[in-house]
Image (tube, helix red, strand yellow):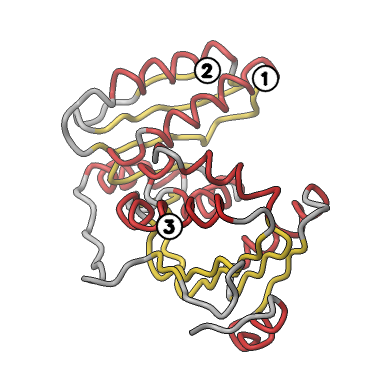
Amino acid sequence: MLRTLPAPSHVLAVQLSGDLSGDDVRQYKALLDAFVQQPVRLGLLIDMTELNDMAMGSLAPGARADLDLFKHASQFDRLALVSDKHWPGLLLRMAAPWLHGVQLRQFASAEQGHALQWVAEPAVEQTASIGVPALRLIPTTSERLLAFEINGPITRASVASALPKMQAFLDQYERIDVLAHFKHFGGIEPALYLQPGLLQMKFKAIPKVARYALVAAPGWMDALIQVLRPLFHNMQMRSFTEAQWDEAWEWVQARPI
């Protein structure tokens, strides 16, 4: 069952209890669609303390509702989950890299009042580096190597500046190697999911990549690669630590200039 909780006008607070049905998820989606029409910074609180499970019929609508939240994530300052269980916290940690700019936090059931107060407060501004692009192409000694460095949060602006060069590179070669250096991965700006041309470029690149080297990638990304590796049987993928910088370049048979 889903019901709304009293909250300030810029905060959507809902409580989930018992078995969540498809109708409940659709109700939540309708609430979210109306809520994000406000021209202000928003907060979202979901109390999952008494939630049992989701009925099978709610899984597909639930996934679509989650995608809607990602689509509007740039309007939110804070998201709070209230639960005494472990898995909601794990869910927040998994979502954090894809919700750059949204502050996420789990609260115990006894802290619901504090959670509502926290989610209603303005978010603390994050200090950003000035003049340093978060996505930087690395010149190399190999014409067929696309090398880039990530240093900070990936935003639409940083991708927009590099996207034309990446697309031109993909148009030029049928088989390529890729090296990605994660100097500091600061997450992904939600608005990036709507970046024109980005998804098409990724689909174009996948069948062309012969070797993909990841240097100093976050642990969760390395684990994801191990899961996805069987799906990309025409692509060799290897992860390297920061200390294996030289070994990574040897593997792709190139050097940075």
Q: Residues within 10 Å of mark 2 (few under 14, many from 20)?
A: some
Q: Earlier in the sequence, mark 1 or mark 3?
A: 1
Label 2: element kind: loop
Identify the residue at horizontal 53%, vertical 51% (top origin): 89
SS at circle 1? loop
Q: Name which residue lies at 69% across and 72% down.
A: 239
Residue under the point 41% across and 71% down? 151
Amino acid on which the number 1 mark rests in the picture: Ala
Q: In the image as oriented, which residue stretches furthest toward the left?
A: 39
Q: Position of residue 226 (x, y in %)?
A: 76, 59
Q: Position of residue 158 (x, y in %)?
A: 34, 57
* Residue identified by numbered label 3: 165
Residue designated by label 1: 55
Q: Locate residue 202, reporting x and y percent.
A: 57, 46
Circle 2 is placed at which residue position? 1
Q: Quadrant of residue 178?
A: bottom right
N-terminal-most mark, 2 or 1: 2
Tell me how far mark 1 sits from mark 3, CA to CA: 46 Å
Position of 207 with respect to 182 (left or right) is right
Q: Amino acid at mark 2?
A: Met
Q: Spatial distance from mark 3 to mark 2, Cα to Cα?
A: 50 Å
Q: Earlier in the sequence, mark 3 or mark 2?
A: 2
Q: Give the CA distance from mark 2 to mark 1.
A: 11 Å
Rendered location of residue 74, percent (x, y): 31, 41
